[in-house]
Image: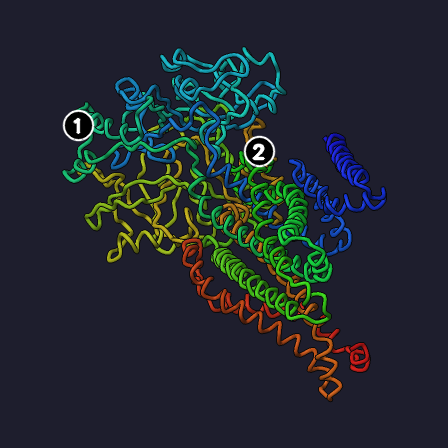
């Protein structure tokens, strides 16, 4: 291409020479001398150089030549000022890297659709209203009989499927461990359009008879990690909760189920529900809602149309349900509420992620914070770029005086900005996975499905951010360079220079305002975290450990579980370094809980609030350090069934002070009776025997009324033990493992950790926001300090003559430094004036993420202002010292 272009230039030059020769020959024939004739021909032709330039400019490849020249010019400028260029690149890398990292996680958690066929057609069906029965899981689920009837009788879906997540114990003979499984209908894979990577997937043929389809499908990643990508895996026998099942296939790579926060290792047919859940029966029970039900809309049917057409069918189902055998007795109001229930049809292109709601606002807040960091970085880089432009103003003016157009000057500066932004973008993309990895370290275990790796979507986002930063920080310096008047710029002093300083000061005010907003936000989140940590759960956590066992997943049946748990309690309590040991059916200090509607006989009213419950051992409260304030604790002799008794029934209860405050405020709780349920025939046969102090369980922000029953009165597949040790947590953990192994080496220990670790898991959002907002605020403050230092240094250099004259006239030297410090303080005050109202407005948006602190918290704002003052002082020291050291004699001599 370039050879062809050079050849064309040569041909055009030869054509000019030929034209001149012809004209000269004609003039010679008319009587002119040869030399005079050639000169006359050249005069008649005009400027040969300009003709060649016009020919060159008419080439369609001229833009490429200009681009090449501009790139070479930009690289020369970068080499001439490497420190300034490195500062710009690093500033952009921090802003772009932070934005790319947070967007990568937000994209996975909030935006990305399922990797299945036509995900936009998927919907999730949820029960909206009053359900008569028990929920078994998270969300407004449906029963299995309702799912089967819906699938058979609807006319809006091409197909439907159901799933239920469950922890199971998987044994392959050599290895044994708890894993996550999805219990799914036979239509699961076909409805989603998922293909097998190996073998076959589950189908309707695996969904016919309870207990008769002992097959499993492995996820691709689990097949790779657990089975080493064994190509002969199909046909292998595995044991799920000690029940033999056969691997029939492996799902396609990249498919991890329909909930990114709850990734299954394997899929089990719904017909094997009893084996997978180790006991409870739900396939034929309409009173147990345990399935998340999805449908794929038929072509041409919208979600709203599907909901409208399913409405009459669902109302008929509700009416028919009230006439079925075994329908419980309800009050008129309860019947009315049940019949008013609806079947919601919700979009499910993203699947169903139980953590999406928990992480949505923190992710959006972090995206906003990184956006502010990027904007501040752009202001900082614009400041530095403007300084580079001012330093080259005479060279730019000379180019303009020699004929360079304003467009050429703007283009050169934009290309230079693009080169710096591209370098910052590449470095930012390299930093992004490390930032993402740091963020993922704060997320709960369910967030393990999120990846710190960058994909095409995220790289395109990084590219878009890089282009945006080029425009944000490159346009102003480029336009300023093009506006410089050659006559003024070529002089020693110029008002244009002063104007450039004014623009830079304006940028500094903007940086200060953004840095202050981030500092105030970080302070609010830090105070929230500190308040919640100081408050704690309501009991001492020093040397308190917890661990869980699930004997049902290790082959124990219901009759064997209670004696095993009792033996564990006795064995661990006998350890020399252990003080007290308690046990509970469910983990405490966690967002999940067993809850019931409770009738309180003493007040003759029905309590319809969500009342958390737990089954606990006699020493549970003693181990936690929660005091019994009234009545007595549980006593195994009076409150527990013996191990041979299979007639499980709750007969006694302990409530906390918050329960008494809410539901028995005027009476004596001891001796009051409770009943589980709110129907007219509810029997209140549970006696309150004690009251304990309130500790925070499902939320550290709000206390809840809670009911405790003896754990031996409730069947359970496992228990969580709470151990108060006299030694270090590490030593106690080793002793606990040894004690469990002595009883049964095959018994799996789950979640062995300190209560402090569990509290940190409860505070995942608060820790995430406080830590990352603090990190972003520090980056922003550092960038603002760099920008202020540059402006003050430039201002001090421009005022050298003024300072010299002042000193020569007798002004004290400290006044020269005071000028610089006052200038920094003025910029800081202007930034503060902008940041305070902006922080108040933004604080209202994050108010529900705060605890124990108001958005306009004076202490937090004072702390942020103090940090800003330190930044001003730090950035002013060197320029102020230079101003103080100015020699009046040398300054005046140089003038």
Separation of residues labelled 2 and 1 (CA atoms): 52 Å
Which residue carries the number 2 mark? 456
- Residue 703: x %, y % from top left: 38, 53
Q: Earlier in the sequence, mark 2 or mark 1?
A: 1
Figure label count:
2
Graded by Cα atoms within 10 Å as few (under 14), some (14 to 19) or many (20 or more), the crowding at tag 2 reads few
Q: Quadrant of residue 878?
A: bottom right
Left or right of 687, for residue 362: right
User: Residue 533's mark?
Assistant: none
Instruction: Specify whether residue 759 is in view.
Output: no
The residue beneath circle 1 is 319
Residue 334 versus residue 161: which sits nearer the camera? 161
Q: Is residue 84 left or right of residue 446?
A: right
> For the point 43% across and 30% down, which residue is it?
717
In the picture shown, does residue 119 fall above or below 607?
A: above
Which quadrant: the N terminus?
Answer: top right
Of 211 and 183, nearer the camera is 183
Q: Position of residue 772 (x, y in %)?
A: 56, 51
In the rendered structure, are the residues bearing label 2 and label 1 in contact, judged by CB atoms less than 8 Å apart? no
Farthest residue, direction front = 31
């Amino acid at each position: 291409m370039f050879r062809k272009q050079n050849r064309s230039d040569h041909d055009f030059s030869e054509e000019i020479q030929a034209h001149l020769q012809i004209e000269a020959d004609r003039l010679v024939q008319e009587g002119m001398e040869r030399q005079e004739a050639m000169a006359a021909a050249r005069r008649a032709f005009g400027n040969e150089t300009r003709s060649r330039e016009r020919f060159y400019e008419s080439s369609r490849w001229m833009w490429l030549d200009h681009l090449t020249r501009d790139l070479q010019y930009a690289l020369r400028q970068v080499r001439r000022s490497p420190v300034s260029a490195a500062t710009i690149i690093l500033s952009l890398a921090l802003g772009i890297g932070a934005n790319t990292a947070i967007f990568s996680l937000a994209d996975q958690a909030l935006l990305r659709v399922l990797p299945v066929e036509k995900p936009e057609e998927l919907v999730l069906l949820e029960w909206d209203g009053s359900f008569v029965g028990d929920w078994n899981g998270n969300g407004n689920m449906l029963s299995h009989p309702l799912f089967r009837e819906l699938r058979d009788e609807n006319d809006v879906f091409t197909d439907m499927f159901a799933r239920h997540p469950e922890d199971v114990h998987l044994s392959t003979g050599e290895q044994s461990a708890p894993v996550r499984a999805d219990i799914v209908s036979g239509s699961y894979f076909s409805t989603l359009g998922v293909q097998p990577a190996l073998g076959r997937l589950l189908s309707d043929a695996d969904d016919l008879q309870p207990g008769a389809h002992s097959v499993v499908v492995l996820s691709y990643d689990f097949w790779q990690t657990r089975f080493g990508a064994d190509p002969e895996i199909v046909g292998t026998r595995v044991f799920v909760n000690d029940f033999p099942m056969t691997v029939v296939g492996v799902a396609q790579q990249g498919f991890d189920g329909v909930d990114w926060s709850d990734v299954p290792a394997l899929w089990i047919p719904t017909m094997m529900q009893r084996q997978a859940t180790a006991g409870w029966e739900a396939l034929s029970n309409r009173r147990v809602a345990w399935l998340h039900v999805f449908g794929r809309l038929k072509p041409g049917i919208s979600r709203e149309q599907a909901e409208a057409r399913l409405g009459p069918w669902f109302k008929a189902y509700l009416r028919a349900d009230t006439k079925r055998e075994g329908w419980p007795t309800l009050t008129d109001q309860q019947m009315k509420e049940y019949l008013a229930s609806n079947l919601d049809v919700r979009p499910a292109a993203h699947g169903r992620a139980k953590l999406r709601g928990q992480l949505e606002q923190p992710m959006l807040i972090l995206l906003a914070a990184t956006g502010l960091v990027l904007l501040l970085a752009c202001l900082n880089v614009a400041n530095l770029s403007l300084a580079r432009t001012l330093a080259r103003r005479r060279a730019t003016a000379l180019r303009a005086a020699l004929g360079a157009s304003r467009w050429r000057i703007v283009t050169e500066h934009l290309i230079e900005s693009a080169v710096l932004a591209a370098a910052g973008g590449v470095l930012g993309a390299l930093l992004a996975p490390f930032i993402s990895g740091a963020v993922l370290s704060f997320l709960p275990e369910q967030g393990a499905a999120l990846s710190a790796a960058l994909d095409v979507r995220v790289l395109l986002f990084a590219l878009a951010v890089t282009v945006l930063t080029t425009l944000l920080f490159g346009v102003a310096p480029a336009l300023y360079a093009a506006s410089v008047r050659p006559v003024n710029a070529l002089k020693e002093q110029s008002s244009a220079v002063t104007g450039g300083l004014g623009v830079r000061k304006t940028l500094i005010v903007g940086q200060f305002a953004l840095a202050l907003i981030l500092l105030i936000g970080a302070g609010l989140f830090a105070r929230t975290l500190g308040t919640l940590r100081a408050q704690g759960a309501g009991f001492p956590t020093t040397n308190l450990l917890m661990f869980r066992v699930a004997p049902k997943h290790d082959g124990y049946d219901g009759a064997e579980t209670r004696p095993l748990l009792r033996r564990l309690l006795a064995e661990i309590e006998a350890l020399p370094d252990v003080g007290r040991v308690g046990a509970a059916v469910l983990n405490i200090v966690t967002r999940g809980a067993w809850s019931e509607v409770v009738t309180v006989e003493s007040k003759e009213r029905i309590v319809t609030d969500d009342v958390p419950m737990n089954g606990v051992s006699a020493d549970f409260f003693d181990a936690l350090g929660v005091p019994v304030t009234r009545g007595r604790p549980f006593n195994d002799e009076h409150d527990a069934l013996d191990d041979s008794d299979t007639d499980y029934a709750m007969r006694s209860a302990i409530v906390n002070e918050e329960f008494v405050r809410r539901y028995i405020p005027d009476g004596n709780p001891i001796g009051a009776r409770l009943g589980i349920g709110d129907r007219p025939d509810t029997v209140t046969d549970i006696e309150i025997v004690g009251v304990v102090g309130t500790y925070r369980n499902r939320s550290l922000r709000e206390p809840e009324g809670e009911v405790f029953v003896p754990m031996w009165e409730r069947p359970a597949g496992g228990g969580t033990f709470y151990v108060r040790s006299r030694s270090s947590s590490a030593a106690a953990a080793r002793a606990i493992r040894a004690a469990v192994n002595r009883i049964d080496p095959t018994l799996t220990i789950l979640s062995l950790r300190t209560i402090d670790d569990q509290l940190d898991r409860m505070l995942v959002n608060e820790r995430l926001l406080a830590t990352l907002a603090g990190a972003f605020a520090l980056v922003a403050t550092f960038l603002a300090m760099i920008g202020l230092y540059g402006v003050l240094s430039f201002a001090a250099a421009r005022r050298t003559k003024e300072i010299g004259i002042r000193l020569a006239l007798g002004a004290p030297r400290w006044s020269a430094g005071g000028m610089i410090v006052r200038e920094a303080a003025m910029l800081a005050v202007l930034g503060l004036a902008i940041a305070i109202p902006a922080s108040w407005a933004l604080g209202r948006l994050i108010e529900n993420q705060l605890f124990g602190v108001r958005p306009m918290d004076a202490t937090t704002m004072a702390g942020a202002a103090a940090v800003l003052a330190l930044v001003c002082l730090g950035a002013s020291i060197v320029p102020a010292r230079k101003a103080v050291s100015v020699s009046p004699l040398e300054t005046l001599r140089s003038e």
